[in-house]
Image: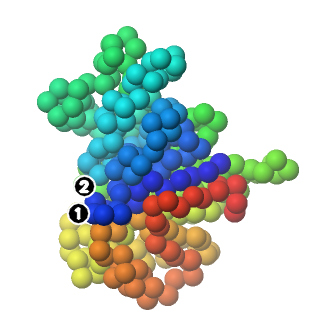
Amino acid sequence: MILNVLGCSGSIAAGCKTTAFLLDGDVLIDAGTGVGDLSLDALARIDHILISHSHLDHVLAIGLLADSVMRVRSANGCGPIRVHALPETLAALRTHIFNGAIWPDFTRLPSAEHPVLELVSFEVGEVLVLNGKRIEVLSASHTVPAVGFAVECGAAVEETEPRGWWVYTGDTGPNPVLWERLRTMRVAHLIIETAFSDEERQVARVSRHLCPAALGHELAQLAGSVDVHITHIKPGEVDAVMTEIGRLGTAHRIHALAAGQAMDLLVG
């Protein structure tokens, strides 16, 4: 079970791609600009897209991906790519993107009977089983309805229990409900956003993101020593944010996430 980081920046600049994670080549978790680095063959192998929320940096590749692979998937007899999200997020996609003005409605192309995209709703707490992978929908607290995701790491052949969970919090400010759930899980990898430095903590608070000081408060609610990977830092701010995070004094092992990283979720 391999997780590839396609993008993990809070916005764009040279070398910075917005949020997208590819799981085992067939499940995409968020669809930011990082998706554009995949080959056409790799894009055509994606069967499911999980969307954390409706903001552009997490959804903008959905329509472009659909346009790129529609002919290939149709020729190969593939079914639609299933886009999974909260009902409010799907409504935003229908209203504001797949409306014929911003982008064609690929939920009805190449035909209404055989579209390249199918929108599928989920709710917080639901466990999805996608191509053999178990993924739980987690609570998030943002300016729009939002979620995170936990992927159950596969067990090695000789083991009977999974090795734990790969957790992606999505875009979220302080969120006690999330930590209540995570305390009941064996977290192997935690991907958590810290979009702003402490100097911009007021912006972070209003926009429902984290700064290093808020991150420290959130991580204090998770026991043990977990591998924590920081995502969604704004371009040009990585050194400043990570320096502030380095002063937190937490027991967790914290690193900045980078596009191009690969995580083997069979390795605890």
Does residue 55 appear in the picture of this structure? yes
Is 27 drawn above or below residue 144 in the view shown? above
The amino acid at mark 1 is Ser
Seen at 45% across and 61% down, the residue is 259
10 Å crowding of disc 1: few (<14), some (14-19), many (20+): some
Find numbered disc 1 in the image and state the secondary structure of the residue it sits on: loop
| Image position, residue 188 (x, y; %) | 62, 62
Classify the position of the C terminus by image quarter: bottom right
Is 226 drawn above or below residue 250 in the view shown? above
User: Which is nearer the eye, 224 or 37?
Assistant: 37
Is 76 drawn above or below residue 246 in the view shown? above
Q: On the picture, is 257 further left or further right than 267?
A: left
Q: On the picture, is 185 further left or further right than 121?
A: right
The amino acid at mark 2 is Thr
Find numbered disc 2 in the image and state the secondary structure of the residue it sits on: loop
| Image position, residue 209 (x, y; %) | 30, 65
Q: Are marks 2 and 1 in contact (CB under 8 Å)?
A: yes
User: Which is nearer the eye, 11 or 179?
Assistant: 11
10 Å crowding of disc 2: few (<14), some (14-19), many (20+): some
Instruction: State the mark number for residue 207.
Output: 1
Seen at 39% across and 24% down, the residue is 70
- According to the image, what is the colour scheme of the structure? rainbow
| Image position, residue 80 (x, y; %) | 44, 23
| Residue farthest toward the left in the current orientation of the protein | 101
Q: Earlier in the sequence, mark 2 or mark 1?
A: 2
* Residue that mark 2 sits on: 143
| Residue farthest toward the top in the current orientation of the protein | 113
Seen at 50% across and 39% down, the residue is 42
